[in-house]
Amino acid sequence: MDDFLSGSSSESEAIGVRTQLQDMLQSTGFHICKWSSNSRKVLQSIPDHLRAIEDELKIDTTDTVKTLGLVWHPSSDTFNFKSTPFNEKVTKRTTLSDIAKLFDPLGFVSPIVILAKLFMQLLWTEEVDWDEQLPNSLMVKWLHIKHNLQEVSCIRVPRCIVTTDTPKQFHLFGFSDASSQAYGACLYLIVIYENETITSRLILSKSKVAPLKTQSIPKLELCGFLMLSDLLESIKKTLNLSLTSIKAFTDSTIVRFWCRKESFHWKVFVANRVAKVRNILKQEEIHHVPTDQNPADLISRGVETSILKESELWWHGPQSLIRQLLYDNEIKTDPILTSEDEKQIQGEQKPHLEKAVRVLAYVQRFIINVRNIAARELRWQRYLKYSELFAAKLLFARQAQLQEYEEETLYLQKGFTIAKSSKLLSCNPFYDVKNQVLRVGGRLEHSDLPFSRKHPIILPPMHRFTRLLFESQHRFLLHAGPSFLLSHVRRQWWPINGKRVATSVYRKCVKCFHVNPTDNCGQLMGNLPASRVCRPSKVFINSGCDYAGPFFVLQHHGKRCKTFSKAYVALFVCMATKAVHLEVVTDTRTEKYIAALRRFIAVRGKVAEMNCDNGSNFHGADSEMKDFRQMLNSVKTKEALEKTFSEDGIKFNYIPGNSPHMRGLWESNVKAVKYHMKRIIGNSKLNFEEFYTLIKQIEACLNSRPLCKLTDDPDDMQILTSGHFITGDSMVAIPEPDYTTVPCNRLKRFQLVQSMFQNFWNIYRNIVFGDLQVRTKWKQPKENLKTGDLVLVKDDNQPPLQW
């Protein structure tokens, strides 16, 4: 059996209630004790052994009685909260225990409790263990919250809400608010007495932390307003009062707009909550309150104990609304929606041009039917015709032109010329009297195109109708690109700056983004490694390798030969000069790769460092190349390479997994090799000798590519290539004449040529490094991903719609 708490309007009535209750329970064997009261006369009627305090006739100001989990002071007839000692060891377990010690069933100190709730949520997000000591950063926050919880004992809440004076009216006001961290609601009972005095008291409040999954502020405001609706419904059943009015206040104009319409207008999240609110509250009971007069704002933000204790707004509600109720007898709080609110509401509605056109077409049909009510054969019925739909679009276009080009329309109607500063001057517009719209004059008057194609209707670029028209045609064309979309729209309409509008619609289309997403997580392009920018002692001293293929070659000569074998191209590229060396490999075994590497060293000289791909980068690559990736990444291959070439001083470097940006130099050359192979071979089949010859010719072409940009200077007859570092000239340059028979005195320029050959690296550094300095992509540093971010996981082996 729990405690009993009640009150009466007079002392005699209180004595009668106590006597009846005591006699009724004694008849069933229950003896009630620990009686207490704030009246001396009532205490005198209670035997001493049944009182809660030994000498209660004195009613000391320090005496307290615990009832229903609350501490009651009979002398002042107030409730307060008892502060218990906190645990010395601070862990998540003890923190939760200390917070739970504060018993506040009616939510009198919700703005203080919400700070403790948010701290517990923070402990969960920081993944602190139950018995782990809190870190210093969290310890400082907890000490501040602990100080507020200890000071709660100084707050006293009056028990009596309605005095013995004759009350005339009872009004129940509720307020809700939300922030990005929490939302809550509070209720106030306003009593108006016969002598025109008015009292307002907080009777109930409730708070809740926002979910970890990020929600927009309007949606959290709606959750808070739903909480307020539930509190109003429950308190109406509890209070035994005849309420004159019930008012629910929110400072969110978007929530009020949502609640004005039926739930089927909105998406699931909003629709479900709006339906519950509309079942509880009437439209005339929902009102707006400014943020600075909303007491629930203290719940959503949280306040310290010292501030809450002195807050008149929290304990008695907004006095301005009370005075307005007292003198005006009504509350006029209907603010105008701001532009930001309208944008968010439009985002929920998702309007379509097709629906708007059909609605307007039915309205125009109704007008025509009313005007032709006598002649039934002239009345339009059944389904809408194309002419009716097009007439509705013309009406939208006419309204858009009047809003944006009113001055030009008036000038052209009167036969005048538009101003030279007008944006329509290049279109040579004219006024279509029949349809009452502006059309493009243009230069296609003598063409055989239809009138609507020669003179399309002008549309302003920033108008809502233009945007909806492009979105409608974009869906009709199955999400076509900007160019196709614009060309289709221009068959009948001429939007100013149409290319910009089409591009904007295409980029903001969610489905088009799913098919062709933009990588927004790319970090700033890294600096070039030392092997790319430091002067090497010779070509290929620092190299990278990769495979291309497979390619199919004939096993032997003959027209009747139909047996093919696989062949791969091993590509070696100099990290500094971008010079390329190609070798043909017959399979992906380790021995074949080592043999190709030995042939490369025999031709180009020893290598100091060899950079290779990591096989894990190629998961999901084509099945033909998986064998090579597995071979290159296997422990057996790595041991064989180190054992074979350790005496030669070659160091093998393997790039990390999932880092394709670190192999761009040799991947671009693989692409170039395939570029030439596809265009030269085509569907032809080559034998091994022909294939090897072609590979070497491609190598010469790749080494003859310019390393810097070409200029328009006629004096620059030759451009620097990778071949200059290998042979001193381009690999496809015309051979020079033989000067061996020329006298020695004619060879005085030999030293100059040798000097130029030795200064190739200086030329390369002065000319090419300027181009390498610029970041062609990944130009801005971006914030790293963190827990809670919404990401799209890209899979190279799946289409974009399945990422």
Image (cartoon, rainbow, N blue to C red):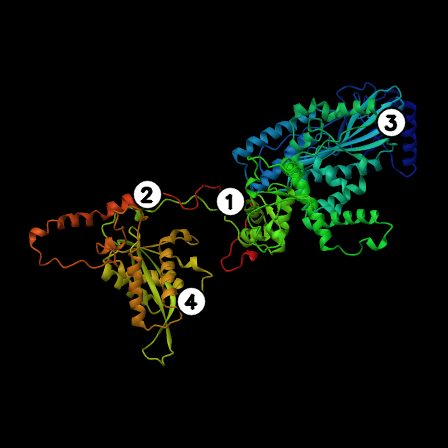
> Is 304 left or right of 582, judged from the image as shown?
right
| Callout 3 secondary element | strand
| Callout 2 secondary element | helix
Could you tell me residue 695's position as x and y percent? Answer: 31, 65
* Amino acid of disc 2: Gly
Query: Residue 169: which disc?
Result: 3
**Closer to us: mark 1 or mark 4?**
4
**Label 1 crowd bin: few (<14), some (14–19), many (20+), radius 10 Å:** few
Mark 4 and mark 3: span between their CA atoms? Answer: 86 Å
**Label 4 crowd bin: few (<14), some (14–19), many (20+), radius 10 Å:** few
Mark 2 and mark 4 residues within 8 Å of each other at the beta carbon: no
> Is 477 left or right of 237, judged from the image as shown?
left
Question: Residue tagged by mark 1?
Answer: 785
Mark 3 and mark 2: span between their CA atoms? Answer: 84 Å
* Amino acid of disc 3: Gln
* Amino acid of disc 1: Leu
> Nearer the N terminus, badge 2 or badge 4?
4
* Amino acid of disc 4: Glu
Question: Residue tagged by mark 4?
Answer: 624
> Is 515 left or right of 643, judged from the image as shown?
right
> Nearer the N terminus, badge 3 or badge 1?
3
